Image (cartoon, helix red, strand yellow):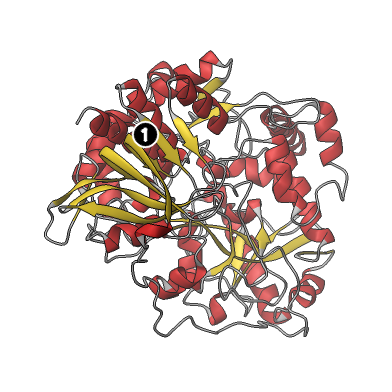
Amino acid sequence: MKKQEKQQQQEQNEEKVRIGSGLTSEQERLLSRRGFITGIAAAGAITALTSVAACAPSSGGGTGTGGGSGDGSALAGGGQAATGAYDWLGTEPQIDVAEIGEMLETEVLVVGGGTAGLFAACSAAENGGKVLVIDKYTSGGIRNDLGAVNSRYQQETGTVIDPHEIVREAYHYSAGRIVPDLHYLWTRESGAAIDWYGDRLAERGVTLWHEFTTEKEPVHYKHFATGHSPEWPRDEQGQETLNGATVLTDYATGLGVEFRYNTPMVKLVKTDDRVSGVIAQAEGGGYVQINASKGVIVCTGGYAENFEMLKALQPEQYNLLGWASFIPGATGDGIKACIWAGAAFDDVRSTCSFDRCAMPVGTAPTGPESGGTFFWLGEQPFLKVNSKGERFTNESGVYDFIAHAASKQPERAYVTIWDANYQDDIVRFDMHGCSRTFLNDNGAPPDIPLPVATGMVDGLIADGFTQTADTIEELAEKLKLPADAFKKTIDRYNELYDAGKDEDYDKEPFRLSAVRQPPFYGTWTAAYILSTLDGIHIDTDMRALDEKGEPIDGLYVVGNDSGGYYAHTYFNLSTGHACGRSVTFGRRAGKIVATS
């Protein structure tokens, strides 16, 4: 490429980044200053300056905020497998009737006031039900990336998604261990659920965007443009002044829905083989029994926060994690209560995890508390090498594939490498969904703009996670990689870039990038967990099923407590797929229970 053409292309890329940032010039200026976003504060800046997406850390969850290995050795702490037997289920608590200090009556009881629960509560109330919501804390949040098929927003952008095609891909992705009827149900009803939410947002003056982008180059993995995200208003400091939980809680309250916070469910109550209510801990102490004449909807968020349960049920996945981010309260309470009540539980485990965890140099992942922190650029298809300095896979896969590939490498560890031209590379990579850092084709803003992601890298450098150097040899030393092997890998990767063809692992040519321009960067990388996805068996009316496939009267399960929708891993080809499932099925459950 001629020098003038290259300069013109660089200017165009810079304009894409600037326009796509969604930030004011003053916010961009602040973010360009080293130290403005440092360490875990980088994650906090997401909520301050961008929307918290379905695949971004929740504002309340997370653990493992950093810290080095301590002894300076490579792979410190690595290799300890999560094995052994764990009594993760325990036994159903026995509550003496004398301990129950209060008895409440309702028609529809929603256990968990998060993404699925608030949609369920609003729907039940709209359909004439007397509704009570209880939550372990002060309600949960609503994720921002919500997946749907055939919403009016998609119709406006001309987006057409073949239901058979997307269900077929989800079926392949899970090796056939899912219930296709549930997926087809989502394709039929999700558009209406998103349109309803868009109406609620419009009532508060909030725009809902469809994240529309088409593929510019041939890719190995097709992206389905299913994501929808609100553009929340912000104050002068960039803080959100409104969120989805507030919008729907206010709306539900206006419909007569009652809320009881700091009231965690202890167990379900059964009367003559029917789930008739729950016993919960009362905020002031003791217990409260809540009887629900029409049904109980359980949606407590899965068990991502319960590390012992995660270790017991998913030891292989557990050992790939270096950090965790979750909506608080996802401790498996709902799943356990349903099993105690006779419901069947998925026998194939699944998590929603992303390759966005920075690890201390020389440290392999050993679980969510192994010292990692948030690394937004981790999912970009830069060069990845193992602890021997060798490339080992096509980096242009979907988010969890790289972590799975690393599971076969020494100590399950890998390192992400890039150079000074990384911002231009990211624009050329043209990633979709959560990993996009500039405007979508229709002007929809990204989850985290590139200036914010760049500021986060500055923080990782300041905290010692990301290493920089002016030579490849110096970078190898700082990253504790064998210099000769690492240099050989870099030289080979540059050859492939120059040739415009990845003869080694077949990465798409436009997602190759040179590693020639100092400073050079490197970050030890792992996966982090956002949520668990295995849950209670349900039918298309959201009724919990027993081991014989028969519905349990009075018990309904939605969100991450429900099963049959995923197996092994998350379907990463569809933006907001799990959250879209939660809002769609929550809305359906509310209507069914209220009108039963």
Please state which of residues 42 and 592 is positioned toward the viewer in this rendering.
592
Above/below status of 588 relative to 411:
above
The relative height of residue 146 versus residue 361 in the rendered view (above or below) is above
Q: Position of residue 238 (x, y in %)?
A: 76, 31
Q: Quadrant of the N terminus?
A: top right
Name the spot of residue 500 as percent of width and height, x first: 55, 52
Please name the residue shown 50% across and 83% down the image. 81
| Image-based side of 440 in relation to 546, left or right | right
517 left or right of 113 in image: right
Q: What residue type is labelled 1?
A: Ala
Q: In which quarter of the image is the C terminus?
A: top left
Residue 264 rendering spot, x and y as whole percentages: 47, 52
Determine if residue 216 is in view.
no
Residue sitting at 43 percent across and 20 percent down?
Answer: 255
Q: Is residue 520 visible?
A: yes
Badge 1 element = helix
Image quadrant assignment for residue 528: bottom right
Front-most of residues 414 and 87 = 87
571 is higher (above) or lower (below) than 53: below
Residue designated by label 1: 120
Front residue of 289/181: it is 289
Mark 1 surroundings: few (<14), some (14-19) or many (≥20) residues within 10 A = many
- Left or right: residue 61 versus residue 483 is left
Q: Position of residue 179 (x, y in %)?
A: 21, 50
